Image (cartoon, rainbow, N blue to C red):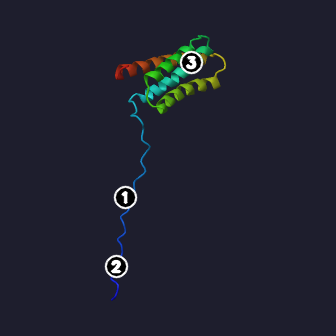
Amino acid sequence: MPAPTQKPARPKASPPKQEPQPEARDEAEAPYEGQLLRLSEIMGSLAYLRDLCGTDDGEMFHTEMSDLLQAESGSEARRDRLAGAYNKGFTNFETVYHSCTANAQNLMGTYLREGHSLAHDIVSRFGG
């Protein structure tokens, strides 16, 4: 008697290909994130410039940044972005200015006004 013919096995369906997913963010970005990054950069700039120009209150901006990092506690990545912006502001001026010039003094005034405006806007629009 001839062997029964077997139907060829049906190939198993392979799972649908999944598109690579963008890296998930561990937190939603705050609507004021850009302003906060700019404020952090300004505080770093002022920390350097204020001490360079003899006001000797640059440490106040360092303390304010530490307070900001604590208040905006989020992921490590977020704290790193904010601290990175502060450090960028500090080192950008550290590499260019080695003595207090008229331009450095003008920049301090401009940055104080911009920083005040940003802080006021963030607090008034988003609470604080």
Sort mark 3 into few (<14), some (14-19) or many (20+) by Cα contacts within 10 Å: many
> Mark 2, residues whose alpha carbon is within 10 Å: few (<14), some, or many (≥20)?
few
Q: Residue at x 36, y 76 (%)?
A: 8
Q: Please tell me whether mark 2 sits on a helix, a strand or a loop.
A: loop
Q: Give the labeled residue for mark 2.
A: 6
Please report the residue visible at 63 percent of the width from the left and 23 percent of the height from the top. 94
State how far apart marks 3 and 1 are (Cα): 55 Å
> Which quadrant is home to the C terminus?
top left
Q: Are marks 2 and 1 in contact (CB under 8 Å)?
A: no
Q: Between tags 3 and 1, which lies in front?
A: 1
Of 9 and 92, the residue lying toward us: 9
Dot 1 corresponds to which residue?
16
2 versus 13 height, above or below: below
- Which element carries disc 1, helix, strand or loop? loop
Q: Earlier in the sequence, mark 2 or mark 1?
A: 2
User: How far, Cα to Cα, is label 2 from label 1?
Assistant: 29 Å
- Most extreme residue toward the top is 55
Instruction: Identify residue type, mark 3.
Output: Ala
Q: Label 3, on which residue?
A: 47
User: In this rendering, would 116 be left or right of 84?
Assistant: left
Q: Residue furthest bottom?
A: 1
Image quadrant in which you'd find residue 62: top right
The x, y position of residue 117, in whole percent, is: 43, 19
Q: Is residue 38 above or below residue 47?
A: below
Q: Are marks 2 and 3 in contact (CB under 8 Å)?
A: no
